[in-house]
Structure formats: structure tokens, C-alpha cells
Image: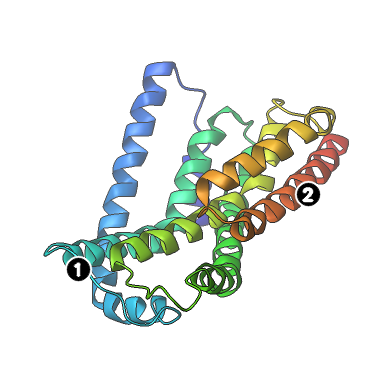
């Protein structure tokens, strides 16, 4: 199986139109796999939803279709999550078309590490950031305002946070790849450190609810990961 996967990424460089065809093919593969995993995971939606709403208590739906759409949304989320190892492999194979034959051996490890990093970010968010964030946000009710949260709004908030943290934890690998193909260097990463930190806080403000806690909770891991990216880029540069 491993030889087959490695053989797939040993293709010659492709012209632009063939790159588009390659991208279309891998998108079709990904959609098929996501659909299969979504169908498989649909039966587990009630159990997953029950655990997701544990920290808030009872939720409500405010339109006739909302409960149905929430089930579809969570089913799709589970399908995408279970497909991530395959999706990461497809992404790295596509991006790795420009690598040399001996360098393409890193694609399988990169796919595996990508999944591990995504889980690290997602679990950190779900088990630590979200419970503390919800507790803080609910505290603004001051015991006067009774919360009546829509299940769709709550689920969008939870899933958006988990995916944001998961994708953010891919930063070191992205920087490693960009260093490998010569687009960035440790010098460039250090030079633009201050600009990147400002951009991180702007992105955190956009991706999170309007409170300082969740913004900082997202920004700090990003800054740490950026510094880690500089170290990874420096090590890779020395190994060249």
C-alpha cells in the first residue's frame, strides 16, 4: 500500500491545464470520501450533539428547519473530520508535484503529522478553550438575562472554533513546506515577526467572539506556532 501511494506522487511536473485537471480529480476523490464518511457517521449524530451541548444545558431551535439543518451540518462535520487523513494526503500530493523524486518521500509523514497537529489544536480548543470561553461569555448575563441559545448558532460557534484551532496548528508544517520550496527563509520570518503578530491578533478578532479572552486564547498559540515555525525553518535551511 505504501509503495502504491509513493508511486502516485512520483509524476513528472505538470503543465498548468493538467494541474487544473489534477486538482479537479483530487477534489472529486475528496468529495466521494467525505460523502461516504458522512453517511457512516450520521447514526452517531445524536450522541455527538448530546456531548457538544453538555456545557450549556438545554438549547432551542427557532425555525422549523433548524433542527434538521443542524443534523446535516454535524453529519458533514463528522464526515470531513473522519476524512482528514485522506484529505491531507490529497493536499500534500498536489502541492508536492514540484518536489524532487527523493523529496516526495516526506508526503506520507506530512499527511500523518498534519492530522496529529489538527487533532492537537481541535482537542485543545474543545476541552480547554471552549468551556472557559462559554463560562466567561455566560457571565455577562449578570444573573439578569436568561440565555436562550439557538442550537444552530451554538453549533456554528463550536465547530468554527474547533476547525480554526485545528487549521492554525498546521502553521509549522506550512512554513516547513514553504522553506523547502524556497519561498520563505528564517531571515524573512524573523524580519516580519512584528507584522505577523499584529496580523495574528486581527485574525483572532475576526475568527472568535467579541471578547478579549477567546481572542487571546487563539492568538497566543498562533504566536508560539509562528516562533516554532522559525525554528523549523532554520533547522531545515541548515540541512539543505
Residue located at (33% from left, 69% from top): 149
* Residue at the disc numbered 1: 67
Q: Nearer the viewer, residue 82 or 6?
A: 82
Labels 1, 2: front one:
1
State the residue in front, 125 or 212: 212
**Element at label 2:** helix
Q: Residue furthest right?
A: 238
Give the label on residue 228, or none: 2
Q: Position of residue 92 (x, y in %)?
A: 53, 42
Q: Residue at x 33, y 27 (%)?
A: 21
Specify whether 102 is left or right of 42: right
**Residue most extreme to the front:** 144
Instruction: Give the answer, above or below, for where 144 lies relative to 74.
Output: below
Residue 127 lies, in percent from the top left, at 56, 74
Mark nearer the N terminus (1 vs 2): 1
Q: Quadrant of the C terminus?
A: top right
Amino acid at each position: 500500500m505504501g509503495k502504491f501511494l509513493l508511486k502516485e506522487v512520483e509524476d513528472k511536473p505538470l503543465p498548468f491545464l493538467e494541474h487544473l485537471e489534477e486538482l479537479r480529480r483530487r477534489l472529486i476523490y475528496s468529495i466521494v470520501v467525505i460523502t461516504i464518511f458522512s453517511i457512516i457517521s450520521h447514526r452517531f449524530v445524536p450522541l455527538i450533539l448530546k456531548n457538544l451541548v453538555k456545557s450549556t444545558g438545554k438549547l432551542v431551535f427557532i425555525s422549523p428547519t433548524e433542527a434538521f439543518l443542524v443534523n446535516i451540518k454535524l453529519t458533514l462535520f463528522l464526515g470531513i473530520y473522519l476524512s482528514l487523513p485522506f484529505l491531507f494526503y490529497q493536499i500534500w500530493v498536489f502541492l508536492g508535484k514540484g518536489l524532487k523524486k527523493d523529496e516526495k518521500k516526506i508526503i506520507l509523514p506530512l499527511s500523518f503529522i498534519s492530522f496529529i497537529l489538527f487533532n492537537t489544536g481541535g482537542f485543545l480548543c474543545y476541552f480547554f478553550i471552549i468551556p472557559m470561553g462559554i463560562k466567561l461569555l455566560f457571565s455577562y448575563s449578570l444573573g439578569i438575562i436568561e440565555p436562550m441559545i439557538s442550537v444552530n448558532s451554538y453549533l456554528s460557534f463550536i465547530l468554527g472554533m474547533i476547525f480554526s484551532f485545528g487549521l492554525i496548528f498546521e502553521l509549522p508544517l506550512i512554513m516547513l513546506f514553504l522553506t523547502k520550496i524556497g519561498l520563505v527563509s528564517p531571515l524573512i520570518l524573523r524580519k516580519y515577526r512584528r507584522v505577523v503578530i499584529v496580523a495574528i491578533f486581527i485574525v483572532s478578532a475576526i475568527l472568535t467572539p467579541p471578547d478579549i479572552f477567546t481572542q487571546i486564547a487563539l492568538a497566543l498559540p498562533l504566536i508560539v506556532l509562528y516562533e516554532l515555525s522559525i525554528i523549523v525553518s532554520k533547522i531545515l535551511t541548515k540541512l539543505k
